[in-house]
Image (cartoon, rainbow, N blue to C red):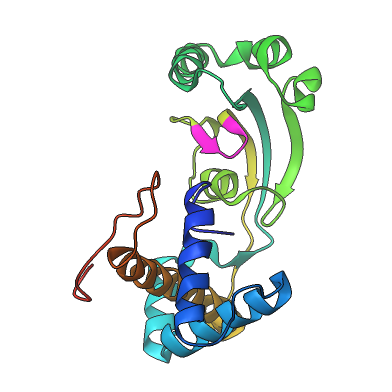
Amino acid sequence: TSIWPTPQLGAVHELLRQRARDLGLVVDGADDTDTERAIERTLAEEVPVPEPTEAECRRWYEANIKRFRSGDLACARHILFQITPGAPVPEIRAVAETMLHELQAKAELFEQRAREHSNCPSGANGGNLGQLQRGETVPEFEKAIFEDTTIGVLPKLVTTRHGFHIIAVDRRVAGQQLPFEIVREQIAAELRQRSEARALSQYVRLLAGNAEIEGVELDAAESPLIQ
């Protein structure tokens, strides 16, 4: 997944193509496949990504220990306020917040409100999602239901790429904590991805400081000492 939205993504690709050309890795008129290979080689040579250390992985594990459990189950319901292109997001959020406050006071209305207002097919069943385990939902939703101990309507709206969710957890079944050794590679991959995203962002900002691409703001930088 790109760390830049469109149209910034197109501008980033053009910056990388120009850099690959400057390095002599791609020539004008090259086809898309050759261009992409040249960009990959440019990034490999100029954006080194350090391998996370054992200590870094262990600190991440300890700081996010609730994430690394197996067998956790939650019986949950939700009401989805879907966000579509061009939708009035502040107004939708306001409606969702108002309903959240209502349901925190009158939880018995949850099923009725889900049937009336939810944009998820589960609304026909009162918002019932059944028994969920880790890995079955988008990350933001998973974090909300598994890194909280609340039984009942959760205290805040949960925002995902689908929209705003009011969530109620009816039952929890605790699983087992996974030892560090089991999830070490998973943690290393995540830290590597985060490091790569930071390095690429800084690299592109430096390239943008020496380029002119009209109509797109990339937060260009002129110094390598950027944060």
Residue 169's place in the image compared with 53, above or below, is above
Tell which of 190 and 49 is nearer to you: 49
Q: Residue at x 57, y 29 (%)?
A: 165
Tell which of 17 and 60 is nearer to you: 17
Residue 150's place in the image compared with 85, above or below, is below
Main secondary-structure element of the magenta-colored stretch: strand
Q: Residue at x 56, y 16 (%)?
A: 107
Residue 161 shown in magenta: yes
- Residue stretch in magenta: 158-163
The N terminus, quarter of image: bottom right
Residue 51 shows up from this direction: no
Please identify the residue farthest to the front as the structure is shown: 28
Q: Residue at x 48, y 30 (%)?
A: 157
The C terminus, quarter of image: bottom left
Residue 123 shows up from this direction: yes
Query: Which percent across, then down, holds residue 68?
Result: 56, 67
| Image quarter of residue 183 | bottom right
Give the total of numbered labels: 0
Tell which of 69 and 183 is nearer to you: 183
Query: Which percent across, then down, holds residue 199?
Result: 39, 74
Lateral position of residue 50 relative to residue 29, left or right: left
Lateral position of residue 212 relative to residue 40, left or right: left
Residue 218 shown in magenta: no
Query: Which percent across, then down, holds residue 91?
Result: 46, 14
| Image quarter of residue 59 | bottom left
Lateral position of residue 9 relative to residue 174, left or right: left
Query: Which percent across, then down, holds residue 37?
Result: 65, 81
